[in-house]
Amino acid sequence: MALINKKQLEKLKQKAGDLLNRSIDQHVTLAVTGLSRSGKTAFITSMVNQLLNEGSNSQLSFFNVVHQGRYIAAKRVPQKHLHIPRFEYDGAMNALCQSPAKWPEPTNGISELRIAIRYQPKESLLKYATEAATLYIDITDYPGEWLLDLPMLSQTYEEWSQQMAALLKQSPRAEKAQSFIEKLKTFDPFAPVDENVLAQLSQEYTQLLLHYRHNLGLSVIQPGRFILPGELEDAPILQFFPFVDFDNIDGNDYQNANDDCYIGMLRARYIEYKERVIRRFYKEHFVNFDRQIVLADCLTPLNNGSESFDDLQNAMAMIMKSFQYGQSSLLSRLFSPKIDRLLFAATKADHVTPEQHHNLVSLLNKLVYQTKQVLNFDTIKMKTLALASVKATKVGKSHYQGKDIPVIQGRQLSNDKKITLFPGTVPAAIPNAEYWQQQAFNYITFAPAESANIDECLSHLRMDQVLQFLLGDKLK
Ligand SMILES: Nc1nc2c(ncn2[C@@H]2O[C@H](COP(=O)(O)OP(=O)(O)OP(=O)(O)O)[C@@H](O)[C@H]2O)c(=O)[nH]1
Ligand SMILES: [Mg+2]
């Protein structure tokens, strides 16, 4: 028998190692969502930053692979889908690290980024044959507003219009909606279509939605693509609106209406939107996600008042429907259960003093689990926590009326001045009338801290717990 020399043996070992390495490479598809301004970009930037710069000022004690010294390194690799925009990590980091530091720009639509983590497997049998393994993570950023469209799939145009009309006629939406509603009352739904009129009215409806979201801080916005159109900007598929006067038209005439009259065309576009936009998103993206984090900014609606908070509550219930597998045949046909971990995070927790974090999580729990009795999450592991992706404040104590009270300190975004304050208490449950009368919460927008360095880890709250929950089991 020919003896193999040491060099050949090394080569063979290397080959075996390569083969095994390849076979234990793993993939996770992680989806990050939340309503606009909830903190998605800041979150993904921080997550990628923590992974890339681990070892340089990192604070990841609850991320086991790091804690156990098995984390080797991470790097960005080319993303999976070439037709999806790349997540702008460098732009976001540049903004956070410039002087004065800035928050990353608002984003619009879906984006993607892939990271490869090299690590030492722990109790794997393969441990003797391989030095390291790789976990690939595909991170997708998509607007939470897109999930708010899901209920439309089970509604006809008439049902949806009735529901939207009811919302538009109530406070706080009614005031601004009045002129739009009046216009629709004088509009003949059976007249031949003039595309320009449809475009004009759709534009007015979109302006209303933008006002509700950005000026009134409301969360229930349908159709979600109207305020975040992505690549569909100006496409006729986004040119429809709810007809608010169904009570005054004849049911038979409506059923028989063709696409060449307004109401027929509105119905046709609504149906097209459901098929081509909503259903397509679920088929092309949602079904492929393994893990999901839903970010919620509970503090801004708390600051805005009870109507804004009620709306967040409704929006959360609508978002939960996307994860409600196996309940209705419509949904189970649309996507088979693949997501096995679902994390809900209350963002911007550095806006409140640490002893309020417990209440913040408890409040988020109330929002998430409000419909728990009708949901079946047997196959999904869920968690809620409070985090700050990029910590902008410091915590301290202040002496006030003979007592030490906890305070936070940061630079106010609006005027760049240093401010120290006790922002108020966070209610542990859905706030009651008494809470709103006290107007107990004071939300100040802070500028990011000045000390960030491009190749160091950003300061955060609980990003390590997030990483452990979302990836820990894949890095054993
Ligand atoms: N203090 C603090 N503020 C944060 C944090 N994360 C986000 N913010 C604030 O929230 C704003 C929105 O954050 P983004 O990360 O841009 O939110 P987004 O969900 O990506 O927003 P869109 O892309 O516009 O939908 C930022 O500009 C900050 O003012 C955080 O961890 N701490
Ligand atoms: Mg963004």
Image (cartoon, helix red, strand yellow):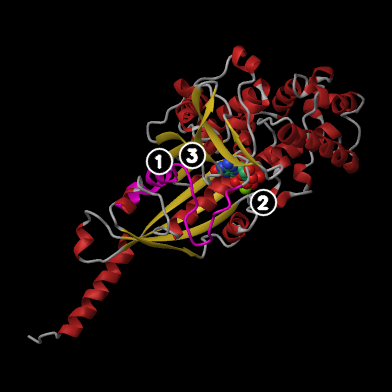
Q: Which residue is mark 3?
A: 387
Up the image or down, 426 lies above or below 54; here it is above
Element on which disc 1 rests? loop
Residue extending furthest top? 434
- Label pair 2/1, CB-CB below 8 angstroms: no
**Front one among 24 and 86:** 86
Quote the CA–CA distance across marks 2 and 1. Answer: 31 Å
Quick check: is the Cβ at mark 2 less than 8 Å away from ligand 1?
yes
Determine which quarter of the picture holds residue 400: top right
Between disc 2 and disc 1, whose residue precedes? 2
**Front one among 471 and 243:** 471
The 10 Å Cα crowd at callout 3, few under 14, some 14 to 19, many 20 or more, is: many
In the image, residue 457 lies in the stretch drawn in magenta: yes
Extent of the magenta region: 448-476
**Amino acid type, mark 2:** Glu
Q: How many marks?
A: 3
In the image, residue 29 lies in the stretch drawn in magenta: no
Residue extending furthest left? 1
Quick check: is the Cβ at mark 3 less than 8 Å away from ligand 1?
yes
